[in-house]
Image (tube, helix red, strand yellow):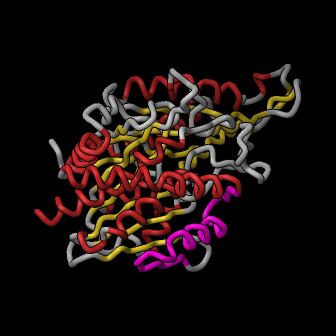
């Protein structure tokens, strides 16, 4: 199926290719000065400066969050949102790039710099076609994706007011350059954290019978949690519960009073998420009580699962095939257990997130490339023109589809 006419395909691809130099320039400028959390003023100012000469209604976040929303208003009609995240990671970059991070302990190792640059490039191309738009395109530049819930904060600011559909694209170095992938339904998992404090009775390590050893109970909890997942959760509903941190004890001859377990819960189904929370609480209190101990458990809900609308995924696939070639779209075979706060957007409006392959040109096997969140992560900048084209084509196709009913 060709969702865009041949004239649009040619002009969009040509414009995206022509924008590549400026997209790379903006990406590298952002890359040099990475910012964390919801306070990204330097990046916000760069975005505003890059958009200032375009016919956009620009609104910058007030208060603590440096969000930026830009509306491109065509004729009366639906509104399609395109999103890019702006924040970096609190980690050191160890590449030898000429535009490597100049800020110690901060790095754009998740590719958000490229997300911003591609969306700015798309805004410029769509602005040139403003008179052809059957509605409004809203560009959402969002800080705080890396654990701060910036999307939720922007929703509270009103970014989804009047929005009919929403799309986002994430780069991945572990896929061939220019390849687009997505899937209907759950694409990414929810991400919750748990803290379990086992409270026993301390004493001398040579006389454990006079104590209630919280370390032994904690060890039993760890193995029982894994049994819980395999015996209570259907195998076709992917679930991961991992204990990632243990705190207990002070020396070799003292049994402590407390032991603490910390970990993560990943689910792709809202129903399974609730089931795991309930089962974990039951397990913790039952096992500790059986040993005459007690427990305190706290589960902090993080990002929900990223669940794509099937019709929106079909649209992304058709746009990719129309613009980039018949083999440019590759369906994801299964969800990935990472998490994304674009999930908050998809809870409110139909839409889809997709991935864009950006494997570096000098690596023949994408599986061996340094992946996201790696200190050595690199990307193939020539592939960013495909991302620009995808944003433009998706906006045009989505507006047409919404107008058609």
x, y percentage for residue 383? 47, 41
Quarter of the image for residue 380 reads: top right
Give whichever of 111, 75 is nearer the camera.
Answer: 75
Image-quadrant location for residue 209: top right
- At horizontal 49% and vertical 37% (from top left) the residue drawn is 358
Tell me what residue is drawn at x 57 percent, y 44 percent.
194
- As for residue 51 lying within the magenta part, the answer is yes
- Total marks shown come to 0
Q: Residue at x 49, y 76 (%)?
A: 53
Residue 108, image x and y in percent?
63, 48
Q: Is residue 189 left or right of residue 90?
A: left
Residue 348 x/y as whole percent = 32, 62
Q: Residue furthest left?
A: 405
Q: Toward the viewer: 278 or 116?
A: 116
**Quarter of the image that includes the N terminus:** top left
| Left or right for 288, reference 311 | right
Residue 160 painted magenta:
no
- From this view, report whether residue 116 is shown above or below residue 2: below
Residue beneath the point at 25% across and 34% down = 326
Q: Quadrant of the C terminus?
A: bottom left
Q: What residue span does the magenta drawing correspond to? A: 33-61
Please say whether residue 286 is visible from this viewpoint: no
- Location of residue 260 by image quarter: top right
Q: Is residue 251 visible?
A: yes
Work out whether 236 lies above or below 112.
Answer: above
Where does residue 40 sit, x and y in percent of width and height? 64, 65
């Amino acid at each position: 199926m060709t969702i865009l006419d041949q004239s649009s395909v040619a002009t969009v691809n040509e414009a995206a290719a022509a924008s590549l130099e400026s997209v790379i320039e903006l990406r590298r400028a952002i890359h040099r000065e990475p910012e964390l959390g919801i306070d990204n003023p330097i990046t916000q100012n760069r975005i505003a400066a890059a958009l200032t000469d375009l016919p956009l209604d620009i609104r910058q976040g007030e208060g603590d969050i440096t969000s930026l929303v830009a509306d491109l208003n065509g004729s009366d009609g639906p509104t399609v949102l395109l999103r890019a995240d702006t924040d970096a990671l609190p980690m050191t970059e160890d590449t030898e790039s000429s535009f490597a991070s100049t800020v110690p302990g901060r790095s754009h190792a998740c590719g958000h710099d490229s997300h911003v640059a591609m969306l700015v490039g798309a805004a410029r191309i769509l602005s040139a076609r403003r008179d052809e738009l059957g509605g409004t395109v809203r560009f959402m530049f969002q800080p705080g994706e890396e654990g701060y819930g910036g999307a939720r904060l922007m929703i509270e600011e009103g970014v989804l007011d009047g929005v009919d559909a929403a799309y986002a694209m994430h780069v991945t170095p572990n896929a061939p350059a220019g390849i687009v992938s997505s899937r209907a339904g759950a694409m990414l998992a929810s991400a919750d954290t748990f803290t379990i404090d086992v409270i026993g009775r301390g004493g001398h390590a040579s006389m454990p019978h006079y104590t209630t050893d919280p370390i032994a109970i904690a060890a039993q909890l760890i193995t029982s949690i894994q049994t819980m997942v395999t015996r209570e959760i259907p195998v076709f509903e992917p679930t991961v519960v991992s204990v990632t941190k243990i705190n207990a004890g002070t020396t070799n001859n003292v049994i402590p009073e407390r032991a603490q377990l910390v970990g993560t819960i990943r689910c792709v189904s809202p129903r399974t998420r609730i089931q795991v929370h309930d089962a974990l609480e039951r397990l913790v209190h039952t096992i500790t009580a059986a040993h005459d101990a007690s427990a305190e458990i706290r589960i902090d809900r993080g990002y929900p699962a990223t669940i794509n609308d099937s019709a929106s995924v079909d649209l992304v696939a058709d746009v990719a095939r129309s613009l980039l070639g018949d083999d440019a779209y590759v369906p994801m075979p299964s969800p990935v257990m990472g998490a994304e706060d674009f999930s908050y957007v998809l809870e409110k409006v139909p839409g889809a997130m997709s991935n864009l392959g950006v494997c570096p040109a000098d690596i023949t096997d994408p599986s061996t490339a340094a992946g996201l969140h790696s200190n050595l992560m690199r990307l193939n900048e020539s592939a960013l023109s495909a991302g620009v084209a995808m944003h433009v084509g998706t906006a045009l196709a989505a507006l047409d589809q919404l107008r058609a009913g």
